[in-house]
Image (cartoon, grey):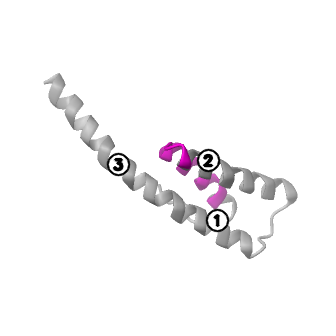
Amino acid sequence: MIKTVLLTAVIAVAFAAPAFANHCPKDMAAIDAALAKNPKLNAEQMAAVKKDRADGEALHKAGKHAESLVALCRAEKALGLECVK
């Protein structure tokens, strides 16, 4: 019974990781496009968006896709973009 549960969990994670990995670049591109339009953010908000964008990319490259999506989602929300998790 325990082996079945563990095997199911491993399979679920194996299929979920690539889905997260493919989502990160799309989010980064959406953030970059929004930043290119010079959004009306104050300096503090802009710095936070740029930090979250950079952190998201670094986490993506490190293979931490779920964490990457959290950072990228914060940046998207600050830019008024829809965040899909």
Distance from label 2 to label 3 (Cα)? 19 Å
Determine which residue is flagged by label 2.
58
Q: Nearer the viewer, residue 41 or 3?
A: 3
Which amino acid, by three-letter code, is at mark 2?
A: Ala
Q: Which of pointers 3 and 1 lies earlier in the amino acid sequence?
A: 3
Q: Is residue 53 left or right of residue 44?
A: left
Local SS, label 1: helix
Tell me, yes or no, whether the two marked residues, 3 and 1, touch with CB atoms within 8 Å: no
Q: Nearer the viewer, residue 78 or 46?
A: 46
Q: Which residues are magenta?
A: 61-76
Q: Is residue 39 left or right of residue 11?
A: right
Q: Residue furthest top?
A: 2
Which amino acid, by three-letter code, is at mark 3?
A: Ala
Which amino acid, by three-letter code, is at mark 1?
A: Ile
Quarter of the image for residue 29 reads bottom right
Where is residue 84 drawn, in percent x and y? 49, 60
- Exactly how many numbered labels are in the figure? 3
Distance from label 3 to label 1 (Cα)? 23 Å
Determine which residue is flagged by label 1.
31
- Residue at the image position 61 percent from the left and 50 percent from the top: 56
Where is residue 60 drawn, in percent x and y? 54, 49
Q: Is residue 67 magenta?
A: yes
Q: Is residue 12 magenta?
A: no
Q: Is residue 83 left or right of residue 15?
A: right
- Residue at the image position 33 percent from the left and 41 percent from the top: 13
Where is residue 34 drawn, in percent x and y? 68, 71
Within-10-Å neighbours for mark 1: few <14, some 14–19, many 20+: many
Q: Is residue 81 visible?
A: no
Against 14, residue 73 (above or below) is below
Q: Is residue 4 visible?
A: yes
**Which label sits on residue 16?**
3
- Residue at the image position 69 percent from the left and 64 percent from the top: 79
